[in-house]
Structures are given as C-alpha cells and as structure tokens.
Amino acid sequence: MQTSTENFLDVTVLEPRQKHPTIFARFDELPEGESLTIHNDHDPKPLYYQLLGERGNIFSWEYLAEGPEVWEVKISKKITGEKDETLGEIAAKDLRKAEVFKKYGLDFCCGGKKTVKEACAEKGLDVTKVEKELQQANQSVSDMRPLPYNDWSMSFLADYIVNTHHSYVKRILPDLEAYADKVARVHGKHHPELLQINELVKDVCEEMAPHLIKEENILFPFIKQLDHNENKTGSLQHNAFKSVESPIDMMQHEHEIVGRKMEEIRELSNNYEVPADGCASYAFLFKNLDEFEKDLHIHVHLENNILFPKALSKEKTLKN
C-alpha cells in the first residue's frame, strides 16, 4: 500500500533541532491504527529509544529501507485495547509479571521453560494465588508500558543486551570481587559464610568475563548474520560452528552455572541481610550483589527466552 502524502515526513529537509519535535508532534496527531513513515539519511534508531521512553509501548517500528543512503521507517500507533504459557513466555510478553515470579522464587530465566502450574507444584505454591497476582500485574501498573523486547529484531536486541547488561556487568565485576575479598578478610572470623561467598563471587567473575567475550565476539555476530541473511541458500556456517545451536547450548549452560552460584550466595547471605556488626563495605557488597542478581535475571531472560529462540527459529527457516 502506498504511503499517503500526509503520513510521510522527509526529515532530511528539517533543521537538526526540529527533527525529533516534529516527528513527535506528527506521531501524537496520528489516530490509533494509523502510521507515519519517516525518510532520513541515517539510521533513526535513537528516535526509537526516545519515543519508547517518552510515549511508552504504544507504537510499532518497521524498517522499509535500511541505508546506506536512504533510511525509511514506518511508525504505527497501536490500537488500545492455547496452551499454558511457560514462565519465560509470560515474562517475554510482559516483563512486569516477572516481579510476581521473583516474589515467589520462581525462576523465569534459566528455568523459564516450565509452566506456572509446573513451577508452583515443584515449590508447593498455591497456583491460583500466583495466577491471580499475574492477572493483577497489568492493573496495578496500568500506567506503565513494558519494553517490547519480543518485538525487536535479533540484531537490535543483541545490541541492547550488550549496551545495557554487558556494560553493567563489566563495570560491576571488579567492585564485587574487591569488596567480597575485603569483607571476608575483615568479618570472616565472626561470619564464616563470607569466606564461601568470597569464593563464589570469584567463581562468578571468572565465569562472566569470558562469557561476555564469547557472546560479543562469536555468538551475537552469528545471530546478526542470521538476522540479515535473507538468502536461504547461503552459507550459515560461522567459524567452527555449523549451527547457532552449539554456541547457544554453551551459553545457556554457563548461565545455569552462574545462576546456581548466585542462588547459593543469596542463601548464605540470608537474602543479603546485613548483620548488626556489618560495616559500610559489608552493606555495599550485599547491596551490589542483590542488584547484580536482579540484573542477571533480566539479562539471562532476554537471551534464553527471547533472543536464542528467535535465532534457532530463524536458522531453521533459512535452512528449509
């Protein structure tokens, strides 16, 4: 269908300071279900993040042309408005519901292939109570729209993971290792569990550092190749791997190792509770371990439940 003149905007003729305000104004005027196509001379990806942050998940984003000289994106305003899903599938559609899973200790990242019923049965939880809270999750935060991770392309999601989660991990790992060692030396005599926590933190750091490198240098480039390879007869081989399945299996195994070690740290620390004789370094360590584990849950969820299944499906399609 040809784009109508009133729904087409050539951004290249606008002054730089007028571009985003003009696009936002035109988008705000759109009726639900209608679209605006913007024409630009470079990738308008930053606009996506700004629109997402300021307007929420009320639009879809479709590339009609992707350079190198001409970029066109169709922005559509959404209309307001079956087997049991797994924990991972539920979280993939609406990450706000992951807060319910966290509350009840249900693993939606590494253990995301279980249904709510299966996961509740394993932990002896009342599934009706959990299901009710999941239904109420949308109502309690109706003014907040979850980021549409599941709608993003594999390349976009991989870049998001690297720039958001990998960068955080690289920044925090040195602090975790240094403070775990310091707190263990100072308080280990009266709190022997800190000695175990220190060793586990070292293990996590030793596991995560090369893990990120393998994802950034091997797996994610392979996935991006799949994302952009529309030639079904083309070679999909990437270095030593004949299929994306092998590196994905390796990364998921490493996710499980780190996940188990973080669970053990949480148990040893009594859910990161700082004792009465704990110093500022003690509190800093536990606060950052807690934040690291929460970030890890989202990080692994985005890979295990969204990015990796998309890559496996795309590879299968290309090979058929």
Image (spheres, helix red, strand yellow):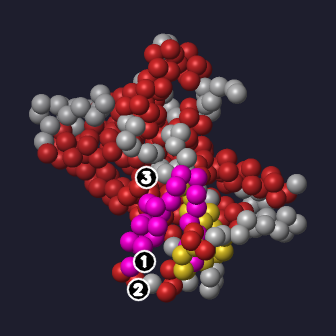
Q: Position of residue 51 (x, y in %)?
A: 44, 61
The disc at residue 15 is: 2
Q: Indicate whether residue 27 is drawn in magenta.
A: yes
- Residue denoted by label 3: 56
Report the number of discs.
3
Q: Is residue 206 left or right of residue 179?
A: right
Q: Position of residue 8 (x, y in %)?
A: 58, 73
- Residue denoted by label 1: 19
The disc at residue 83 is: none
In depth, the one of 204 and 60 nearer the eye is 60
Of tags 3 and 2, the one toward the viewer is: 2
Disc 2 element: loop
Identity of the residue drawn at 66% across and 69% down: 3
What span is in magenta? 18-39
Identity of the residue drawn at 45% across and 16% down: 129
| Dot 3 alpha-carbon crowd within 10 angstroms: few under 14, some 14 to 19, many 20 or more | some
> Would residue 61 be visible to someone looking at this image?
no
Labelled pair 1, 2 in contact (Cβ < 8 Å):
yes
Disc 1 element: helix
Identity of the residue drawn at 55% across and 15% down: 121
Vertical comparison of 97 with 162: above or below? above
Q: Position of residue 165 (x, y in %)?
A: 44, 56
